[in-house]
Image (cartoon, coloured by chain):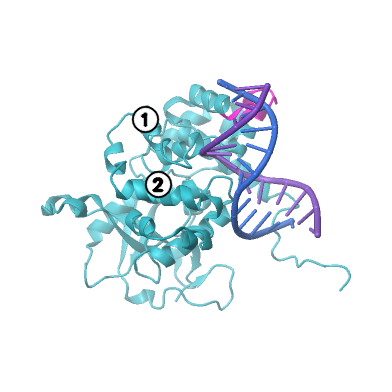
Chain colours: A cyan, B purple, C blue
Amino acid sequence: VCYPEGMDGGEAIVSDLVTVPTVEVDLGGPLDLEKTLECGQAFRWKRVAFPGRPELTIAYLGVVPVRPEPDLGLVQSDRVRQSRQLSVVVGQTAPATDTVTIAYELDSDAPLSSLEVERAALRYFSAEDDVISIERELSSKDEMMRATVERSHGLRILRQDPWECLASYILSSNNSIANISRTVERLADCFGEPAGMGRNSFPAPEKLAGGDLVSLRRSGCGFRDRYLWDAAQRVARGQIDLCALQNLPTDEVREELMRLPGVGPKVADCVLLFAYHRLEVFPVDVWVARAVSRHYSGGRTVTPASAREEGRRRFGRLAGYAQEYLFYQARAAKSAQPSGPLESCPMVSRGE
DNA sequence: AAACAGGTGCTAA
DNA sequence: TTAGCACCTGTT
């Protein structure tokens, strides 16, 4: 039985982990689950605790895409393109190990082999990225980056589902990570399909397109409701083919994405980085803009456009990793401020 | 309770 | 091209 981290005696999420299958996956390089899943690139991971399970000392519950076996010959048009979504618990014994343990629930309707789950994990966690080399190369750029990389050891850029990533980042504009997570979760509860372990898949574009603006607004989309609805509509109608974008050059993918409502330079670059794995892009939000201003522009405030140029110029094909390290460090520094969240320190209010 | 955080779309310089 | 503003939800 597992509990949400920090909630004593909270409601059990996974009632009986003993009976679910597990597979150990070797990524061939370090993965720090906490940094990777809580840095803000993905929105659906929840920390969970399994007392007495050393292989799950650090564990997260989330929903990952599982692609169908390529060699099964299923040519049913849409089936092939659409990946399934599966709830999993991913755990490790200590930060930044090379291997993780994946626990998943068997679905009798559509059983999965442990090999398929392993392949999904290798893909989702970008096992092909040689993070040791990436960290070494970026460390050599300058002293500030060296220290930043050191703090970010084991942070990996994920390979997320393009539609979920696009939709999530449309919601991210002028919004906080906590809000985005809440909204994504409500959308899944409202429009998604059961994915095991009590959680739902991120809703297919057809599902969101078939919904109404009022339910999107109620889910917490805010003024972005019409952006999301419109984007879902265009994806569902095939006016933009997110699978086909996989094979286009980065600039063209960016151009296509930015035709969608609610998708500007930042959101397009995030989708390029976190779904299409274009490691040469450098998404610029306020945090990264501040970091570039402070460290690479002599303290002078830079525009997002020039910060983006500077990032790509300095870090080239690894700009995406450099950006994540800078972002992770900036936010870690922020939450360490005295005004940051101090949950163990109850607020004392006057006049009660 | 009012101030603030956070990208994009739109309009006006 | 770019500066300035509105947009919604939640936290401090």
Above or below — where is A335 with respect to A139? below
Above or below — where is A16 with respect to A123? below
What's the magenta region? A292-304
For label 2, the residue is A231
Q: Quadrant of the C terminus of chain A?
A: bottom right
Q: Which circle marks residue A159 in the picture?
A: none
Residue A296 is covered by the magenta coloring: yes
Name which residue type carries label 2: Ala
Respond whether the residues carrying marks 2 and 1 are from the same subunit.
yes
Q: Mark 2 falls on what kind of element? A: helix
Q: Quadrant of the N terminus of chain A?
A: bottom left
Q: Nearer the viewer, residue A46 or B11?
A: B11
Decide if residue A272 is on the left or right side of residue C12: left
Q: Residue at x 49, y 66 (%)?
A: A48
Tag 1 subunit: A
* Rendering coords of residue A332 (x, y %): 62, 47
For label 1, the residue is A250
- Quick check: can you spot residue A102? yes
Q: Residues within 10 Å of mark 1 (few under 14, many from 20)?
A: many
Q: Residue at x 71, y 53 (%)?
A: A340
Q: Residue at x 37, y 64 (%)?
A: A192
* Rendering coords of residue A74 (x, y %): 13, 54
Tag 2 subunit: A
Q: Looking at the rendering, which quadrant does residue A174 occupy?
A: top right
Q: Mark 1 falls on what kind of element? A: helix
Residue A299 is covered by the magenta coloring: yes
Viewer-nearest of discs 2 and 1: 2
